[in-house]
Amino acid sequence: MFTLLQLSDCHLSADPEARYRGENPDANLKRLLPACRALSPDGLILSGDVSEDASPESYRRIADLLRDLAPNRAWLPGNHDERDVMAEHLGTDYDAGPLLKWGGWEIVLLDSARPDDPRGHLDQDRLAPLASLSGQAPALAFIHHQPIPVHAPWIDKYGMIEPDLLWQRLDAHTIKAIGFGHVHQAFVGQHQGITCLSAPSTVANSQAETERFTPDPTGPKARWYRLRVDGAWSTGLISAG
């Protein structure tokens, strides 16, 4: 059994006292970490918007905060991130993929982010990592932007520009699920036989299916996956204590 933890939308800034939607990103991430450590995760994926301002300080600080959380660590950028700055300051402790082989599974990381646009961008080059899947092992895909609408107009207007490009390349016989961030709420859906799952934000979330961002009083969250070598899997959410 391989335990995978997905953290998303941390929105740290250069200033550790900066606020995001009225919350302190550093403090809320620290509140969540005891529950994350209790899972004893084997792998960690940061699924974008790790930083609010793409500052070196924010990436170095999160790398320090999470250094002992899991032996395997990987990342992909969100629209608030700068890929090159992120890569430099997360360093060799984090894998940028795009293909990970963890716990008998293949995990593909897809980059949908462009720093100058909050919407998701995909083209054939960005989708090329899907071709590296062997088809001989169960697989997950991770991406920052939502691959289907989450029925919340405030964030769905910043979804994928051309989601069909993605869905033309996903095969339900191989890909068990696609995990994403960006939406700051819990969501589970299905499309073309593939489960679509969000990881809520570690700093501030909205109640689901709202017209506008509507603060969720239950606080910061993360998503976990339990992956078995036979392809069976389960998932759930954890919250700060």
Image (tube, helix red, strand yellow):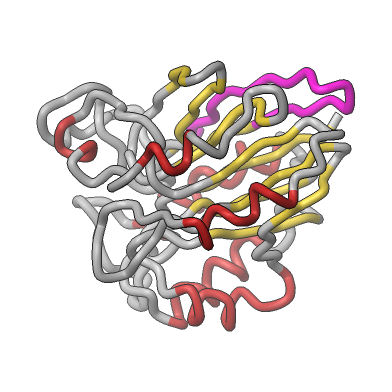
Q: Is residue 176 left or right of residue 105?
A: left
Q: Quadrant of the N terminus?
A: top right
Q: Is residue 42 left or right of residue 207?
A: right
Coordinates of residue 67 in the picture (x, y in percent): 69, 64
Coordinates of residue 45 in the picture (x, y in percent): 62, 50
Coordinates of residue 141 in the picture (x, y in percent): 61, 41
Q: Nearer the viewer, residue 26 or 145?
A: 145
Q: Is residue 26 above or below residue 147?
A: below
Q: Nearer the viewer, residue 136 or 159?
A: 136
Q: Is residue 206 above or below residue 78?
A: above
User: Residue 104: within the magenta?
Assistant: no
Q: Which residue is at the far left?
A: 211
Q: What's the residue at 60%, 56% (across, down)?
A: 128
Q: What's the residue at 76%, 52% (across, down)?
A: 100
Q: Is residue 3 above or below residue 95?
A: above
Coordinates of residue 73 in the picture (x, y in percent): 71, 57
User: Residue 239: within the magenta?
Assistant: yes
Q: What's the residue at 63%, 23% (across, down)?
A: 172
Q: Is residue 102 left or right of residue 147?
A: right
Residue 216 sits in which quadrant?
top left
- Highlighted magenta segment, given as a residue range: 225-241
